[in-house]
Each structure stands twice: as structure tokens, then as C-alpha cells.
Image: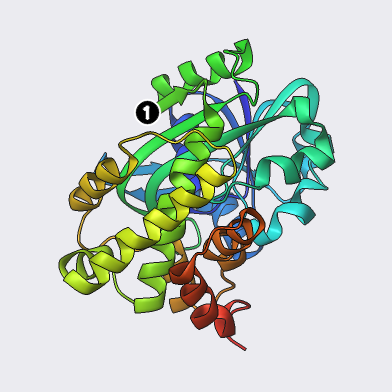
Amino acid sequence: MKIAIFGSGGVGGYFGARLAAAGEDVAFLARGAHLTALQHDGWHIASPMGDLHLATVRATDRPQAIGPVDVVLFTVKLYDVDAAAATLAPLIGPDTVVVTLQNGVEAVDMVATHVGADHVAGGVAYIVVVVDQPGHLRHTTGQQLVFGERDGRRSDRLAAFEQACVRAGFQGKLSEHIETDLWVKFVRLATWSGMTTVTRSPMGVIRDNPATNEMMMAAIDEGIAVGKARGIRLPDDLVDATATLIKSLPPASKSSMLEDIERGRRLELPWLSGAVVRLGSEAGVATPIHQFITTVLSPSVNGAK
């Protein structure tokens, strides 16, 4: 398959490199020092699933240099979605699908305004991976992509991409209920990102402290209440399944937002805890914990001065 990785950071870089190593035709869109590193020495990935050095990769900062592809994995940060989506046109052919892999629940509609709803599918990435330095990724746990058409049909284009994921050796799942999948991750990630960042602590610290663990689970309840109030069908066992998942996470696991605040970068806060508050307010649902997280982190939302 012809695949473009738009936003070649941790998530896009990891899955794109695995796909390229398996023989797919992958092009990476990057910029700055990251682009220079990819063009000169490719990808270096340290991973419990097996280290990888992909010495030669196709990397550029110009979508026009790539042309139409079968699949675009759209992995830019939420605050860059609108500006980046406005440059997608050269990658779009008659049946191209842009799989949005942002952390919130609003990216699908944001991208659709630029390329048309027929060219956009929702996606969820379950992975903990960070960029250690340009061209170098450190993968901790998880390597699953879930994606699906907005109307729930099993399209040929996403079925083909599912098979490409299998060939690449990571989990790829074509979902018939992608809106539910997006909200399940949103409920969890908004909470985990907010809690790890506001405490400046990895998951093990929060999980093992009774007070912060209770606060975390209450924040999960807030997210679920917002989703249900907005008509989202969420699994009945979501709280129990989330508690089980939390217990399985490596103690040193950090959210990408915690990594961002430690490095003085912009935060995705307005689309995570901030979105829980905003969407909850629209639905008449109180979200005091997410409001606390949003308020406390607001001075850092635009990164270090």
C-alpha cells in the first residue's frame, strides 16, 4: 500500500517504520531537525517488541513530493490539526482515506472540513512511545491501531490497511463502532494525561497512592457521564475494564502531555480535560476534577515562555 505518515513523531514514526520495514510504500512528512535526521540516517527504534534501524526512508516536508496515496496516517498534535489538514490536498486521490489518530474526539470533523467527510476515518492508537532525539524513538508498551469508517461499514480500503498492519507485525483492527472506540480512549486518556501532568508523576505513582487513584477513577466517571449525556454508547463494563488496564500499565508509563510539559512544549489540554469540561458544560454535566486539571495546567498550555 502507498501510505503517508503526516506528523512523523512518536506514534506516526513507530507505526510508519514498522509498515515500511514490512515492505509497504511509506513516505514520512516531517520538518526541522527531525526531517534532517530521517533523511540522513532513517529511523532508530528501541522497543520491547524488537529494536529496528530503518536506515533508508522516504522523508520530506512537502506533500506535493509524495502525491496521492491509499492511506494517510494523520498524527499531528491536536493544536496543529487545522493548519496541517489544510495542506492534505496533494495526498488525496479518489479513494484515499485519512485516518485521524489524535487523542480527542473532535479531529475527524476538523479534518473533514478540509478534505471531505468521504475521505476521513476515525482512528485510535494504543501505544506509549516518545521521541528521544530526532530520528530516535523509545517504545515502552502497546502497539495497536483501531480504525473505522464513520458509518460503520467494512470498506475495502480499510480492510486492505488492516492486512498491511498484520504484515507489519502489530495489531490493527477494523472497527464497526469507531465513535465508541474514540470515546473509550478519550475518557481514559483525558484522565491519564491530566492526572500524570498535574501531579508530574508516572502512572505507577498515581495508581499506588490511594488518594490520587480515587481521584483518577472519579475523573473517569466524569468522562463517561459526559459521553452518555451526548448519546455515545459506551460499554457497561468500562469502569471495571479501565481499572484492570490501569493495573497492567508499566509503573514508569508517562502520558505524552507529561512529556510535553517536562520539555516546555505546548499542551493538548484544551482537547483533553478541557474538552471534557466544554462538552460536559454543553450537555449539562458537572466535571469538577477535569475543571481542576484544566485550571491548574492552564498557565502552561502554550509551553514555556
Residue pictured at 77% horizontal, 53% vertical: 82
| 217 displayed left or right of 265 | left
Please give the count of numbered marks on the rendered protein: 1
Residue 136 is at least partly visible in this image: no
Q: Position of residue 257 (x, y in %)?
A: 47, 66
Rate crowding at label 1 as few (under 14), some (14 to 19) or many (20 or more) other CA atoms within 10 Å. some
Above or below: residue 7 compared with residue 305: above
| 43 displayed left or right of 283 | left
Pick out the residue farthest to the bottom: 305
Q: Secondary structure at mark 1?
A: strand
Above or below: residue 34 compared with residue 201: above
Residue pictured at 62% horizontal, 16% vertical: 157
Residue pictured at 52% horizontal, 45% vertical: 227
Q: Nearer the viewer, residue 165 or 116?
A: 116
Render colour scheme: rainbow
| Quadrant of the frame with the C terminus | bottom right
Pick out the residue farthest to the front: 284
Q: Position of residue 107 (x, y in %)?
A: 66, 46
Above or below: residue 167 compared with residue 88: above
Question: Identity of the amino acid at label 1?
Answer: Gln
Q: Nearer the viewer, residue 56 or 271?
A: 271
Q: Nearer the viewer, residue 160 or 232?
A: 232
Residue pictured at 62% horizontal, 61% vertical: 281
* Residue occupied by mark 1: 171
The quadrant where residue 3 appears: top right
Q: Position of residue 44 (x, y in %)?
A: 40, 50
| Quadrant of the frame with the N terminus | top right
Q: Nearer the viewer, residue 9 or 292?
A: 292
| 142 displayed left or right of 39 | left
Residue 53 is at least partly visible in this image: yes
